[in-house]
Amino acid sequence: MRNIILCGHTGSVNRGCEAIVRSTAKILKLAGYEKNTTVLTFNKNYDEFLNVNDVVDLVAYPKKIYLKEL
């Protein structure tokens, strides 16, 4: 079974983003991807506080990526 990675999640402070993650996870679960969904998030601690990690795996990534000038 393939793994699903959802990116661009800015954290569940915007509760609409939380609803999108939960709804998407529910749809993917119905399609057989229950244990294979990961969300990349800017705010892992708050997502865990809201128990989003009960429906998906969470991986933190930085809010800004800085490119070093050559």
Image (tube, rainbow, N blue to C red):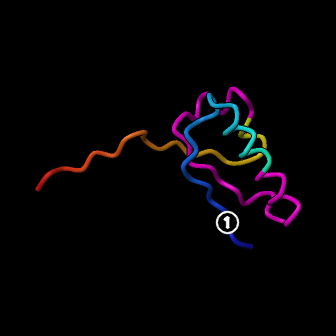
Give the farthest residue toward the front: 16
Residue at image point 70% right, 71% down: 2
The residue that mark 1 highlights is: 3
Residue at image point 51% right, 38% down: 42
Q: Is residue 51 above or below residue 3?
A: above
Left or right of 11 in this view: 69 = left
Left or right of 62 in this view: 8 = right
Task: Work out whether residue 50 or residue 16 is closer to the camera in this orientation and state it.
Answer: 16
Task: Work out whether residue 27 or residue 40 is closer to the camera in this orientation and state it.
Answer: 27
Quarter in which the C terminus is drawn = bottom left
Residue 65 position in % (x across, y down): 34, 46
Q: Residues within 10 Å of mark 1 (few under 14, many from 20)?
A: few
Residue at image point 77% right, 40% down: 54
Residue 46 position in % (x across, y down): 62, 28
Give the farthest residue toward the left: 70
> Does residue 70 belong to the magenta stretch?
no
Residue 5 position in % (x across, y down): 62, 59
Left or right of 10 in this view: 36 = right
The quarter of the displayed image where residue 14 is located: top right
Q: Is residue 17 above or below residue 56?
A: above
User: The magenta stretch spans which residues?
Assistant: 24-51
Residue 62 position in % (x across, y down): 42, 41
> Does residue 28 belong to the magenta stretch?
yes
Give the farthest residue toward the bottom: 1
